Image: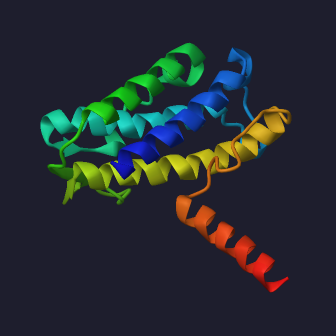
Amino acid sequence: MELKNACHRILTQLEEVVAQLSAEEFRTPVRVLNQSTIGQHVRHTLEFFICLEEGIAQGSINYDNRKHDKTIENDKSLTLSKINEIKAFINQKGKNHSLKLHVNYDMDNTDSTTIPTSYLRELAYNLEHAVHHMAIMKIGLKELKPDIIISPSFGIAVSTLRYQEKEKTEKVLDA
């Protein structure tokens, strides 16, 4: 399935970058990230996938209620293990099914709104969310460790990559 492959590709890119960081670099506040760490961004990204996995059993998801697990953002080894667990979950989960998404965007109200959704819709959301945070991480990674090897597609949406490729092809044809 295309969506599973895309998630696997993105998570593998994330895994490759995390593997290149020392434990200290993973936990180091980065100036251009407003003093947040790469570990915090990775934890945030992974917890959305974890919420999806946990929500399937209940038939509902609430990303606002994620754990904010400090061990994931501080323990590089645990983080790499979590990435592999998430990839295994995505590979095992095959069928789409209905879910309920609980959201609350009102600071003055604690009641959530329930929105009908599905596993595949939320998996697509998690993929886009991961790409977005990877783009932010890339900015911090370049400051933190300028010699890090990052895939050219790290933090770039596939639609953007296609557009960039089309632009290159058109420039060659116009030349």
Rendering quarter of residue 27: top right
Residue at image position (54%, 65%) is 159
Identify the residue shown where x is 41% and y is 34%. 47
The single residue placed furthest to the bottom in the displayed view is 174
Give whichever of 41, 84 is nearer the camera.
84
Colour logic: rainbow
Q: Position of residue 80 (x, y in %)?
A: 53, 21
Q: Nearer the viewer, residue 118 or 62?
A: 118
Image location of residue 167, percent across then percent down:
70, 75
Please identify the quarter of the rendering in which residue 76 is found: top right
**Residue in the picture at 17% in, 50% down:** 99
Residue 111 in sight from this viewpoint? no
Q: Is any atom of residue 79 visible in this view?
A: yes
Count of marks, rendered view: 0
Position in image of residue 28 (x %, y %): 73, 26
Is 150 left or right of 101, judged from the image as shown?
right
Is 122 left, or right, of 82 in this rendering? Answer: left
- Identified at 72% across, 18% down, the residue is 22
- Relative to residue 6, is residue 109 depicted above or below? below
Query: Going by the image, does 157 lie left or right of 20?
Result: left
Q: Is residue 52 above or below residue 120?
A: above
Residue 150 on image: x %, y %: 72, 39
Q: Nearer the viewer, residue 130 or 10?
A: 10
Q: In the visual, does 8 lie left or right of 27? A: left
User: Quarter holding the C terminus?
Assistant: bottom right
